[in-house]
Structure formats: C-alpha cells, structure tokens
Image (cartoon, rainbow, N blue to C red):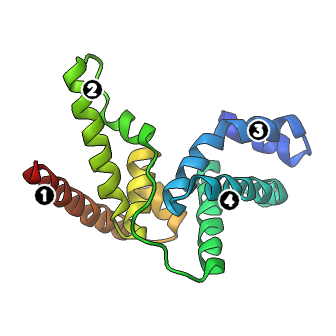
Amino acid sequence: MLSEDELLVRRCQDNDEAAFDALFHRHLNRVYALVCHYVGNPEEARDLTQEVFVRVYAHIRSFRGQSAFTTWLYRIAVNVCLEQQRKAARRRSHAAFVPLDDVDRALSTEEEGPMDSVVRQETRERVQQAVGDLPEAHRLVVSLRYFQGLSCKEIAEILDCPVGTVNSRLHYAMTKLRAALQEQLAEC
C-alpha cells in the first residue's frame, strides 16, 4: 500500500496541482525549520524554502521513489542551502538561530509551575546559544536528528555521506553541547 506522500507524488507527476498544494502544505513547516536551522536567518530561510518548493515542482517527475519522498525533499533543501552559501561567498558566524519553539518542544513537560517555566525559558536560551555555536555540519545533523526526528540512516542519505559520519558528527555535537551547557550551569 502506498503512503500518502507516494500517492501525492504520483498525482503531481500527472500534473495534479491540488496534489502539489497538499504536498507543499504537508511539508512546508519542516522544510522551513530545516532551512532556518541551516542558514540561521528566518527571512533568508523563507526565501530559500520557497526556492526548495520551486525546485520540487520543477523536478517532481524525476523522483523515482528509490528513497522516501522526505529524503529527496530534504536533499533538495540542503542543496539549496549549500548553493546559497556558495553564492554568498562569505563565512557565516557560528551563532545561528534555532527557533525557540523547537527547543521548547524538546524541553516541554506536561505539568509545570511558574518556577518551572522560568527555568525552562533559561534552559531554552542556553540550548539555543549552544546549538548556534556548533560548527555548521554538526548543527545540521543535530537539527535533522532532534528537531526533524530523522534517523541516522535518513540523515546519511540526505547528506550523501556514510552513517558512521552522521554518528560521529552527532557524538561530537552532543559532547560539545554537554560541555557548553555544563559550563553555563557552572557560571550560575
């Protein structure tokens, strides 16, 4: 049985505009979050997200289903980000924008009092800063793994690298995050 994405892709390949609209709305927020984590600028992320979907629309017929649609879509998103980075011809600072909603979801608990809310807000800001300070390649795998919920295998397909490389980057990133957060807590 075909997944909803597979059915929509087939309809898109038959020039069904409504199917593309459904795919667009189904994946817009996740693609935007991925691009925003990558480029660190919400306005630029909106423009690049639009470019991602323009490319998806232009090339949907070339999708053969050898991987999941989301893998193909995220690969396009990463390529658009890489191209933008090359066009900019300047190095971005390590400080990157991590949407607080994503951090908030990762930290949320079902029951919390007023003090818990204050602590969570401080923790969100610390996590946002620590993730933003990671090197770009590590920031990207953290975003894909923990904010997008992808498996290491899916991330490897998107980044076109071995699973071991993804695992290594995640390990390095988590080690750096742990150290940065412990350092921040020690300062309190």
Dot 1 lies on which element?
helix
Q: Position of residue 6 (x, y in %)?
A: 70, 41
Q: Distance of mark 1 from mark 2, alpha carbons?
A: 22 Å
**On the image, numbered disc 4 is attached to which residue?**
48
Q: Quadrant of residue 56?
A: bottom right
Query: Does residue 144 sit above or below 116 in this rendering?
Result: below
**On the image, numbered disc 3 is attached to which residue?**
8
Amino acid identity at mark 1: Glu
Q: Nearer the viewer, mark 3 or mark 2?
A: 2
Q: Distance of mark 4 from mark 1, alpha carbons?
A: 35 Å
**On the image, numbered disc 1 is attached to which residue?**
183
Q: Position of residue 176 (x, y in %)?
A: 22, 63
**On the image, numbered disc 2 is attached to which residue?**
117
Q: Nearer the viewer, mark 4 or mark 2?
A: 2
Dot 4 lies on which element?
helix
- First in sequence, mark 4 or 2: give its number: 4
